[in-house]
Image: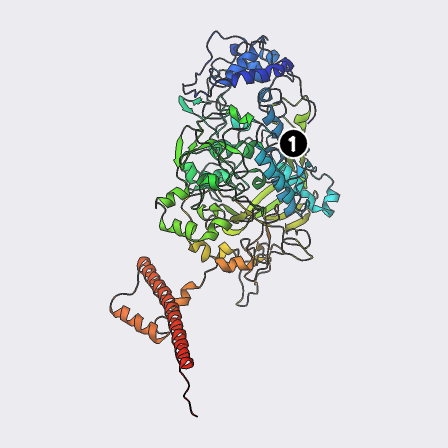
């Protein structure tokens, strides 16, 4: 990563850090519920001579502040500011105090946090460079796949060079987890590489670009997709303000980017500042803002990044992207932009409505990584719904490791049980009583905040709630499941063994069909290169910079994105990398337009193709547009049966089977025409341009006879559309015809019954009556066939007995003597 700038007295601090932490670990994890003071006690001196009224970074009585005080006592800064920020507390002026590369405006920046946060959290600082929030390897592979499968299925590019260490960070994970991940690495080596190299530079040779327009993807990536990684501060727009590295999550930033604390030296009318000078983390870390106190990391902090791509953060909040700015504001204006987008209000995820933050489900490994490289979210995230909820047949602790996370791996069925202790580094968070053990993730690590209590589960949230959860097995045993839930989860076994829980329980999913990307190199147009900016931070003279506002890391090309249309209802189904049925949404469905430096069009609405013979294709390859498996994070009212079993869209055939849309590969002209569609004027313009090669609607990715039309997941070997057998097993379209083709006069029997019911007023005119009638018919048919079989069997046995008795009687009769 290059050399790091030296911190004043950092070597001495690092030497004693481990000793301090060992001493502090002897203290119990006391819950510091007292309100956080808003100013430091004592006379202002050193840093506080200017920063009057600033908030203490943590509760003064917390373990972290006690450790900082130990470090501070060895410096000329009794308050401890320089332990994290460096600088000179004895200086007479701001310029002298903040002078040099050993002053850290943002101590959480990954370029210097080995000298700050890493004094106590060394294992997390090491792991950060291989975490998905740093590498963004999944984004890179997905985009380069859409531009001609430049990496194939491999995940070999990251934002910066990265290599696996000798072993996973053992202070963060268990031995069971390591063994499990080693097996996954063997099964899916393309997603779990040993090393990654920095994503290639954006093209600057325009003559070369004309011959290789697929290289424009690196302009697209560097200027747009990769701005959210932790090594840069990123785009400074409403909703996107954040810190770098550790500070991106652990320092609060409001959506407006204004400081609202008590420090007189920080301007309150200048966007881009933290909300208050406090760390947000676990339940013990109390933060006070405008006399309101909270703990934990609010969801909107996560959404400074998780608002595009799969959009899981904003979806969790119940926000669906909209093409419109309505409704009007007072005075007639439009909806204000958030993350540069506009939204409609949808139902929030049920966990959000319960007051759960992202961190209440997601573990340290999910966020920080385990020190090893992982190419996608599904590769790094270790949790499954059943880890807490279990199944109707088993409590969470009765399930084997790997349940719901199979990746075609087999299990010996041994119950995972509970964990009695935590990995060493995880003790530093808020501790909870675990008399009956911590629940374990599908990959074998303990949840630090989820414990067993009898046959129930207690989820201790970072915000301070203790939520008692009834596992499904207990709800079933106590007859508390609704009929629909019992049928779906207990009666129909395949729902639990083959499908993700969220296949049914996701109420909606954001679906942005068609990603029309224009990369325009004409007239000297430029974009900011976020990866080049990150590499500038690697230089010793820039490592301590708190952002990129003054950087000149521009590259040729201007990027613009648009969509074809947006939907949210009835997400389609496919198979994900774990081998389970999952919702899918449009991933990188790129239609690329590239304009050269001379203003000439190099590509127009072009869809690249994948590798030959890949994704159900032939020698030409498959269309590089992707339907991506997703956990939408919109858990709520479960999908009704018909939304899958009577839906062409759910099966992958497209919205209304794709019948409503014209073929996109044909241009549309709108003007005066004859009855046989001959255009009358000569001065006409094309209304809707053609997209060559796209012969079906964006939502249609498999045909009724099983032909795959686009990519379904570009990461894992198991992801694919539903195959013919699976679709036939799910598809119940036309089921109404099975009865109604005989009603009212199809046969003598149905005609008679229909007319009797009609004149008796017994025709089923409501869903309830119709369901009752179907149930009655089913029961009569079932019992009738059973009785027929039983009666026939008994009759057959009776005939056999009669036959053998007659035969025995005949053979036993004495012959007459005729002599």
x, y percentage for residue 356?
A: 43, 34
Count of marks placed on residues: 1
Crowd tier of the residue under label 1, counting other residues whose Cα lies within 10 Å: few below 14, some 14–19, many 20 or above? few
- Image: 723 above or below 794: above
At mark 1, the secondary structure is loop
x, y percentage for residue 774?
A: 35, 62
| Whether residue 679 can be seen here | yes
| Whether residue 558 can be seen here | no
- Image: 780 above or below 230: below
Seen at 63% across and 53% down, the residue is: 615
491 displayed left or right of 253: left
213 displayed left or right of 411: right
Seen at 70% across and 38% down, the residue is: 200
Quickly name the residue at label 1: 167
Give the quadrant of residue 5: top right
Point out the image quarter for the N terminus. Answer: top right
Tell which of 267 and 124 is nearer to you.
124
Point out the image quarter for the C terminus. Answer: bottom left
x, y percentage for residue 695?
A: 59, 58
Seen at 40% across and 83% down, the residue is: 814
- In the image as oriented, which residue stretches furthest toward the front? 819
- Image: 363 above or below 393: above
- In the image as oriented, which residue stretches furthest toward the left? 760
x, y percentage for residue 14?
A: 62, 16
Q: How is the image coloured?
A: rainbow
Give the quadrant of residue 113: top right
- Image: 381 above or below 21: below
């Amino acid at each position: 990563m290059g050399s790091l700038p030296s911190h004043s007295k950092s070597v001495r601090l690092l030497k004693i850090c481990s000793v301090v932490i060992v001493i502090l670990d002897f203290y119990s994890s006391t819950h510091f519920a007292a309100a956080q003071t808003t100013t430091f006690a004592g006379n202002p001196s050193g840093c506080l001579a200017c920063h009057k009224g600033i908030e203490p970074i943590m509760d003064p009585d917390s373990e972290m502040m006690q450790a900082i005080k130990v470090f501070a006592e060895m410096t000329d800064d009794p308050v401890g500011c320089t332990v994290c920020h460096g600088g000179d507390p004895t200086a007479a002026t701001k310029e002298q105090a903040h002078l040099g590369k050993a002053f850290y405006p943002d101590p959480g920046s990954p370029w210097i946090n080995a000298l700050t946060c890493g004094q106590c959290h060394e294992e997390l600082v090491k792991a950060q460079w291989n975490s998905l929030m740093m590498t963004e390897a999944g984004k890179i592979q997905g985009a380069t796949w859409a531009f001609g499968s430049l990496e194939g299925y491999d995940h070999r590019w990251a934002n910066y060079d990265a290599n696996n260490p000798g072993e996973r960070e053992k202070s963060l994970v268990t031995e069971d987890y390591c063994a499990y991940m080693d097996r996954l690495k063997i099964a899916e080596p393309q997603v779990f590489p040993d090393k990654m190299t920095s994503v290639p530079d954006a093209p600057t040779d325009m003559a070369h670009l004309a011959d290789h327009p697929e290289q424009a993807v690196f302009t697209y990536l560097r200027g747009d997709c990769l701005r959210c990684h932790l090594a840069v501060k990123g785009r400074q727009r409403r909703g996107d303000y954040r810190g770098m590295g550790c500070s991106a999550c652990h320092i609060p930033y409001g959506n407006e980017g204004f400081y609202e604390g008590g420090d007189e030296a920080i301007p309150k009318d200048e966007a881009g500042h933290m909300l208050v000078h406090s760390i947000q983390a676990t339940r013990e870390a109390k933060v006070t803002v405008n006399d309101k106190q909270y703990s934990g990391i609010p969801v909107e902090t996560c959404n400074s990044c998780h608002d595009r791509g799969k959009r899981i953060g904003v979806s969790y909040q119940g926000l669906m992207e909209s093409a419109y700015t309505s409704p009007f504001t007072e005075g007639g204006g439009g909806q204000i932009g958030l993350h540069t987008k506009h939204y409609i209000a949808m139902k929030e995820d049920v966990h959000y409505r319960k007051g759960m933050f992202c961190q209440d489900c997601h573990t340290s490994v999910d966020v920080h990584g385990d020190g090893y490289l992982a190419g996608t979210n599904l590769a790094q995230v270790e949790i499954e719904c059943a880890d807490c909820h279990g199944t109707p047949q088993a409590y969470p602790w009765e399930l084997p490791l790997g349940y719901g996370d199979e990746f075609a791996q087999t299990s010996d069925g041994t119950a995972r049980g509970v964990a009695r202790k935590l990995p060493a580094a995880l003790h530093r968070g808020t501790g909870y009583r675990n008399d009956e053990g911590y629940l374990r993730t599908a990959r074998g690590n303990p949840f630090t905040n989820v414990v067993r209590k009898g046959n129930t589960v207690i989820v201790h949230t970072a915000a301070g709630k203790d939520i008692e959860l009834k596992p499904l097995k207990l709800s079933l045993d106590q007859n508390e499941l609704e009929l629909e839930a019992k049928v779906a989860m207990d009666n129909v076994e395949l729902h639990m063994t083959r499908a993700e829980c969220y296949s049914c329980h996701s109420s909606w999913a954001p679906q942005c069909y068609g990603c029309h990307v224009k990369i325009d190199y004409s007239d000297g147009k430029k974009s900011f290169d976020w990866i080049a900016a990150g590499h500038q931070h690697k230089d010793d003279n820039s490592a301590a910079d708190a952002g990129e506002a003054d950087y000149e890391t521009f590259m040729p090309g201007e990027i613009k994105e648009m969509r074809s249309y947006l939907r949210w209802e009835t997400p389609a189904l496919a198979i994900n990398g774990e081998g389970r049925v999952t919702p899918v949404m449009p991933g990188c469905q790129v239609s690329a337009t590239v304009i050269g430096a001379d203003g000439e069009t190099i590509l127009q609405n072009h869809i690249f193709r994948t590798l030959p013979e890949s994704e159900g294709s032939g020698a030409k390859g498959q269309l590089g547009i992707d339907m991506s498996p997703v956990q939408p994070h919109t858990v709520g009212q479960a999908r009704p049966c018909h939304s899958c079993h009577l839906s062409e869209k759910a099966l992958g055939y497209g919205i209304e089977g794709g019948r409503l849309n014209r073929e996109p590969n044909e241009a549309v002209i709108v003007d005066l025409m004859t009855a046989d569609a001959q255009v009358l004027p000569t001065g006409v313009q094309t209304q809707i341009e053609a997209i060559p090669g796209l012969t079906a609607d964006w939502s249609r990715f498999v045909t009724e006879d099983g032909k795959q039309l686009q990519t379904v997941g570009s990461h894992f070997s198991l992801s694919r559309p539903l195959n013919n057998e699976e679709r036939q097993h799910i598809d119940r379209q036309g089921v109404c015809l099975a009865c109604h083709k005989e009603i009212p006069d199809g046969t003598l029997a149905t005609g008679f019954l229909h007319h009797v019911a009609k004149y008796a007023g017994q025709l089923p005119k409501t869903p309830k009556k119709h369901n009752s009638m179907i149930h009655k018919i089913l029961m009569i048919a079932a019992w009738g066939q059973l009785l027929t079989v039983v009666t026939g069997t008994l009759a057959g046995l009776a005939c056999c007995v009669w036959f053998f008795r007659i035969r025995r009687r005949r053979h036993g009769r004495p012959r007459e003597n005729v002599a």
